């Protein structure tokens, strides 16, 4: 009886194992099938240019005209502002550049943006490279870290450059905070989008949203943003705004000057001075946050066999006397000592080193050259074509000198 019971138990155990193996095999087959379908969905979406894109929908267009510049931004087949890129990498060494509007080439043609000038300079040096411009206007370290895993997975670059703008990106670390998403449907949608972006799009969870924005539409948007901001000011802020030169106030009202400048000049006029004070608790916290975000980019790069490094993008307040005065006219608090300080680069260097990344800066060299040339738009503040060219040429030398 006991023996019969043991046999029965043994048979049940064998059956359970067999069922477990069958179930496991079925799950594995299902997972492999899903990944196979993801591959087919991806092939369809990218071959037909219907993919949601890394940053924007492919073939989107933005026209932008102000009193200082006029350009058209075209979005490529993979969803970023550049020429079309192949998802499969050839023998050409591929460099991906993460950054904000300075990297994007705000106010410039794509050929004039500093990443594309960097590409041209490195090729002139005999380097067989291609550079992908992943600049996003309005982005900061938090957005760089969020974009990095998807971009690196898709493009498989050999090198990832994080272009950190002096003061501005550090201050964005002060503003950023961890937002907790409590909606399980949103979390699930986000997870599916990360794991199976093409299937998620075909299922209607993400959308291409291809757009064409005209200069007039953008101007009207800026006008509305300025009006909304001004309507919420208290008397003290209104008084500060009234101190701005009439021409500058008119440009804001007409939608010809970036509302972001107005916002910062009223709310945080001294942020470019404050971020130079490395002993402040707030600055130390910003450096810590920047370190964390750079670490996320580093981890994504390591996962796909890429090398990450950090370059400092000089903000004009620290570059030339004329640019310093232009910022004063826009309502910012500035001091002559800012033209000699090393603090903005020291802050970025500290974060890069703590994240275990190489760091390069060209501020002093750009300062010397900027005494005889206009490297920034006087009002808008982004690189002019000459500024982007000078910066990229200096960075190319630094990049070429790094060990391969």
Image (cartoon, grey):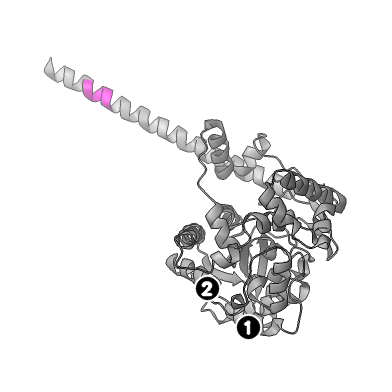
Q: Please, what secondary structure does the residue beneath circle 2 have?
A: helix
Q: Please, what secondary structure does the residue beneath circle 1 have?
A: helix
Image position of 248 (left or right of 321): right
Q: Nearer the viewer, residue 312 or 161?
A: 312
- Please give the label number shown on residue 343: 2
User: For the point 65% across and 80% down, which residue is it?
Assistant: 366
Residue 279 location, quadrant: bottom left
Residue 362 in sight in this render: no
Please state the horizontal and vertical placement of residue 78, each as a whole percent of the image.
Answer: 70, 54
Q: Residues within 10 Å of mark 2 (few under 14, many from 20)?
A: some
- Please give the label number shown on residue 62: none
Main SS of the magenta part reads helix
Q: Which residues are magenta?
A: 9-13
Instruction: Identify the residue position indicated by label 1 in the image.
Output: 365
User: Is 234 above or below relative to 7?
Assistant: below
Residue 228 location, quadrant: top right
Image position of 386 (left or right of 237): right
User: For the point 68% across and 79% down, which residue is it?
Assistant: 393
Q: Disc 2 and disc 1: Cα gap in Å?
A: 16 Å
Please state the horizontal and vertical placement of residue 47, each as a whole percent of the image.
Answer: 73, 49
């Amino acid at each position: 009886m006991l023996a019969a019971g043991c046999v029965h138990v043994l048979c049940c155990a064998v059956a359970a194992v067999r069922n477990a193996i069958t179930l496991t095999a079925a799950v594995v087959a299902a997972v492999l099938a899903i990944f196979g379908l993801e591959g087919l969905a991806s092939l369809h979406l990218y071959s037909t240019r219907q993919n949601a894109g890394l940053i924007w929908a492919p073939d989107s267009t933005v026209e932008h005209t102000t009193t200082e510049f006029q350009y058209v931004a075209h979005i490529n087949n993979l969803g970023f502002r550049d020429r079309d890129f192949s998802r499969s990498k050839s023998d050409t060494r591929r460099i991906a550049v993460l950054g904000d509007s300075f990297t994007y080439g705000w106010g410039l043609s794509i050929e004039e943006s500093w990443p594309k000038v960097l590409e041209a300079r490195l090729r002139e040096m005999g380097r067989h490279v291609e550079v992908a411009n992943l600049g996003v206007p309005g982005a900061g370290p938090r957005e760089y870290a969020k974009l990095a895993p998807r971009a690196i997975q898709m493009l498989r670059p050999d090198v990832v450059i994080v272009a950190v703008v002096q003061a501005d990106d550090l201050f964005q670390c002060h503003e950023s905070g961890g937002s907790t998403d409590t909606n399980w449907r949103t979390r699930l949608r986000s997870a599916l989008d990360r794991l199976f972006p093409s299937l998620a799009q075909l299922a209607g969870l993400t959308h291409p949203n291809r757009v064409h924005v005209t200069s007039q539409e953008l101007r009207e948007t800026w006008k509305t943003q300025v009006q909304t901001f001004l309507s919420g000011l208290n008397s003290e802020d209104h008084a500060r705004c009234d101190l701005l030169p009439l021409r500058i106030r008119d440009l804001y009202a007409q939608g010809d000057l970036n509302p972001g400048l107005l916002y910062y000049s009223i709310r945080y006029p001294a942020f470019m001075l404050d971020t130079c004070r490395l002993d402040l608790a707030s600055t130390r916290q910003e450096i810590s946050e920047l370190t964390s975000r750079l670490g996320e980019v580093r981890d994504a790069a390591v996962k796909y066999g890429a090398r990450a490094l950090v370059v400092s993008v000089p903000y004009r307040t620290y570059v030339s006397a004329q640019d310093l005065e232009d910022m004063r006219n826009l309502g910012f608090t500035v001091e002559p000592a800012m033209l000699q300080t090393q603090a903005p680069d020291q802050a970025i260097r500290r974060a890069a080193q703590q994240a275990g990344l190489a760091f390069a800066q060209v501020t002093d060299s750009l300062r010397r050259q900027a005494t005889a040339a206009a490297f920034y738009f006087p009002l808008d503040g982004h690189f002019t074509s000459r500024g982007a060219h000078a910066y990229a040429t200096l960075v190319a030398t630094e990049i070429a000198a790094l060990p391969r």
